[in-house]
Image: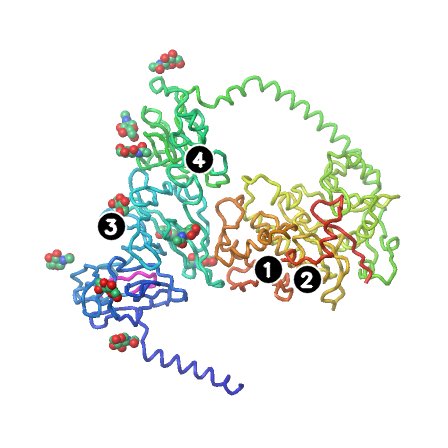
Amino acid sequence: MAHNLRILPLLIALLLISMSQGTAIRDTITPTQPLGDNETLISEDGTFALGFFRPTGNTNNLYMGLWYNKIKDKTVVWVANRENPVINSSTGFLSISINGNLIISDQNSKVVWSSNTANVTNPVAQLLNTGNLVVRDLDDKENSFAWQGFDYPTDTLIAGMKLGVDLVTGLNRTLTAWTSDSDPSPSQYYAMMDIHGDPQLVLCQGSKKVWRTGPWNGFRYSGVPDTITYSGFNFSFINNKQEITYSFTTNLSVLSRLLVNKSGVAQRSVWVEGGGFWNIFWYAPRDQCDYMPPCGPYAKCDPNNSPICDCIQGFTPKFPDKWAFRDGSDGCERKTPLDCKNGTDGFLLVPGTKLPETSNSTVDMSLSLADCKTKCLNNCSCTAYAPADVRNGGSGCILWATELTDLRVYTGDSYAQKLYVRLAAADLDKSSSTKSHGSGKWIIILVTLLGLVLLIVVWVGYLKLRQMKRRRTGAILEISASFSEPSSSNQVADSLPGKDIELPLLDFNTIAAATDYFANANKLGEGGFGPVYKGKLGDEQEIAVKRLAKTSVQGLDEFKNEVMLIAKLQHRNLVRLLGCCIEREERLLVYEYMPNKSLDFFLFGKPKDVVFDWETRFKIIMGIARGLLYLHHDSRLRIIHRDLKASNVLLDEEMTPKISDFGMARIFGGDEAEANTRKVVGTYGYMSPEYAMDGIFSQKSDVFSFGVLVLEIITGKKNRGVYLAAPHTNLLDHVWNSWKEGNSLQMVDESIGYSYPMNEVMRCINVGLLCVQNHPEDRPLMSSVILLLSSDNTLLPYPKEPGFAARRVPHQMETTSSKPYSSSINGITVTLFEGR
Ligand SMILES: *[C@@H]1O[C@H](CO)[C@@H](O)[C@H](O)[C@H]1NC(C)=O
Ligand SMILES: *[C@@H]1O[C@H](CO)[C@@H](O)[C@H](O)[C@H]1NC(C)=O
Ligand SMILES: *[C@@H]1O[C@H](CO)[C@@H](O)[C@H](O)[C@H]1NC(C)=O
Ligand SMILES: *[C@@H]1O[C@H](CO)[C@@H](O)[C@H](O)[C@H]1NC(C)=O
Ligand SMILES: *[C@@H]1O[C@H](CO)[C@@H](O)[C@H](O)[C@H]1NC(C)=O
Ligand SMILES: *[C@@H]1O[C@H](CO)[C@@H](O)[C@H](O)[C@H]1NC(C)=O
Ligand SMILES: *[C@@H]1O[C@H](CO)[C@@H](O)[C@H](O)[C@H]1NC(C)=O
Ligand SMILES: *[C@@H]1O[C@H](CO)[C@@H](O)[C@H](O)[C@H]1NC(C)=O
Ligand SMILES: *[C@@H]1O[C@H](CO)[C@@H](O)[C@H](O)[C@H]1NC(C)=O
Ligand SMILES: *[C@@H]1O[C@H](CO)[C@@H](O)[C@H](O)[C@H]1NC(C)=O
């Protein structure tokens, strides 16, 4: 065995030597060196390979194609002779004639395809690093090509390829889908550049337009709001006298392609090296509003509405009867005719649109937006105008003189495209004209009232502050004395290194007054063991007060636990305890107030069309990770939180996350790696399988909860605890399946907005999945998690199957879960003291 292993490197070396000598890797064809079907050309940097292939299910036909050399599963991106295969031949040849004509021939030297190039004196065909197969003069130092494969795209646009029209040579580059997996010949589905009016890409089926991108607005196509800002990408749209083309370039390490697939869908994907699959991160058409034309003239389409078609302001359904049956195809007509001669018409702003069909529009890039408006107003046939370039506040001018068709609106579009529609004065902005009268009086009254209230508040606050200051000085609690516990129990109080904790002791009446005597209006929510109120100490310090429910027996221990623990912890990402109160029956905790409530409110409670952008979400993920790292490794104690969940992550005014609720946290001794508990505490959906089933908890069970939280933050969906009946309704299941299929980006929350750094999101999904792996030993420690999240270049491990705790929940757990815990909605909170 050992002997064999030593020989192995030698064998590999020998193999490499023989390979480099025998079949020299080449990227060129010369008249004396044709390419047989047993060979491939490899581009110099090894990215692309060109050679003959037989499509699956059609072994009679031989095609000359281009694919990625490094991707095992052959992804053909270009075919030279898609309509002219080498048929029934044992072999095929690609050769170049002495005057530069590139030729594909069969075993009998019958020519099936040629590039029709000529007049090249010293010809060579070369496969460039971009994947472009070019014919050039070997002596031509200017690198001008007599012919290039990039001029004849097949169904795929790769980096550097252009889609569109060369106005000088008349070249018309389109993407046309393969007929089937076994037949690369052109099908009826294609994408082309429509150069009429304001140019746009159009996806067609035969002569029928299926979907259009809308015109390019400087950033992107007006109908493709989800163009992703990706560090390795550069999209380019050229519209001048020579050409109207669209192309993209990528970082060398990024392999991406835009494809018209066999069912006529345009999709863009990127190769995920670590996973070994193509991740489709965008496709169109996607919803009802994409298919042209969803609604008739002057109706806007919104897929989130029902019915999806709606007349724009100033218009009314042309045939209300049909409209009532949800048939909006006839569109809308004006309520009031235009009054052009009098010059009373105005414009209605429709924000966040995909511009209406532009093929009959006229464009003038030299006009400013103001001139554009004037020009439209002065031409009685003009129906609408819009800026042609939305950058820098908008410039250039698109004018419509026809009905406006195929108009749709987007919500959450951060680079909203504006459209100005001409309306008669009577139909313009009725609501605002009534508002402006009579409201002035009310504003004055309101301002006076507000001023008075403010004065009172300041005065009362001042009094409170003086009172507070007097109380606070000197009133420091020595908690350890009153909290000492029997030494046998394995609790916080014992594990604390120094038992004396200094924490301001506040008096009950002060806190009660600060919260308006626990008024319902000030109630922020129900925590694990009692309600939480908002309050104000003095005139500026806002506080959150947790009031331990008097009925809760166990709560008292948790109260102590939390006080002992949190008073010792100081971190930017942990909620700060300002003081506490123990008086008669009352147990109160006073925290800093978090104006943005908790994470679950943002993730699950907000209306879907409010943008909760990626930058914020990523900041929150990193913040939670740092807080947890501090708990696990960096603080003086080693702490397992045991109940990490969205509602326990609070957000301050800058959306900095703060981990809260340490009622169930446990402190570990230095050498302790995991512990066992008979009473399982925590929240379904966040509990790791080994904890939920066997009561074993460790840092890795917190890592599991963190992973669930990350996936919830990305998808905006809750990992439900109650999914025993339907195994595939679990969020982890969903993400895992879409990850395996390479569509994980389709799980990304819609309210994230349309532009986010795809690589960062992918990285977070990957890390999230690593954290929720079934076996605790497979899950990374928090220190690695932070490293994986923050480094751009590390290759992430491919995750194993997640643990689906709930699917295998033991009987005992189910009975626990059915007990009604009245005080808590989303968390089951039971005792810490399992008495081991
Ligand atoms: C490919 O086949 C041709 C003829 O069948 C032969 O001459 C050539 O050596 C072969 N090349 C390789 C690399 O096997
Ligand atoms: C190719 O061979 C198949 C059967 O092997 C035959 O049906 C077909 O007609 C042949 N085509 C050509 C062009 O020779
Ligand atoms: C090749 O050159 C000859 C003479 O210079 C010219 O007549 C002919 O049109 C050229 N052919 C092509 C395809 O450029
Ligand atoms: C380009 O080709 C497509 C598909 O054949 C066609 O619909 C389109 O009109 C052409 N464009 C131009 C400018 O010739
Ligand atoms: C390639 O992408 C990385 C980030 O993934 C970026 O830092 C780098 O600048 C890019 N390089 C080029 C040449 O665009
Ligand atoms: C993006 O492409 C355009 C056009 O090719 C080029 O002018 C620009 O410099 C590129 N930008 C980056 C960041 O590569
Ligand atoms: C084409 O792409 C769409 C969207 O990604 C997908 O649903 C469909 O199955 C694809 N069709 C084929 C034939 O692959
Ligand atoms: C111009 O407006 C006035 C009142 O606003 C109206 O009476 C008159 O008919 C209008 N003229 C035309 C030509 O529409
Ligand atoms: C654009 O103009 C053409 C020819 O004038 C006409 O057939 C077509 O219906 C017009 N399209 C729209 C959307 O008005
Ligand atoms: C008004 O606009 C239409 C369409 O853009 C154009 O054909 C016509 O010449 C314009 N009329 C005037 C007076 O500018």
Label 1, label 4: how many angstroms apart (C-alpha)?
A: 40 Å
Q: Is mark 4 on a helix, strand or loop?
A: strand
Identify the image quadrant of residue 37. Answer: bottom left
Which residue position holds label 1? 802
Q: Does the magenta stretch include residue 137?
A: yes
Q: Is residue 83 magenta?
A: no
**Residue at (34, 42) in percent of width and height:** 200
Which residue position holds label 4? 301
Image marks 4 and 3: residues in contact by CB distance under 8 Å: no
Image marks 3 and 1: residues in contact by CB distance under 8 Å: no
The image's mark for residue 690 is 2
Q: What element carries label 2?
A: helix
Instruction: Tell me where the magenta segment starts and ends, as one range.
Output: 127-138
Label 2, label 3: how many angstroms apart (C-alpha)?
A: 63 Å
Q: Nearer the viewer, mark 2 or mark 3?
A: 2
**Quarter of the displayed picture in which ligand 8 can be seen:** top left
**Quick one: label 2 or label 3, which is nearer the N terminus?**
3
Q: Is mark 1 on a helix, strand or loop?
A: loop
Image marks 1 and 4: residues in contact by CB distance under 8 Å: no
Where residue 730 sits: x, y (%)?
A: 60, 52
Which residue position holds label 3? 171
Where residue 391 sits: x, y (%)?
A: 42, 40
Q: What element carries label 3?
A: loop
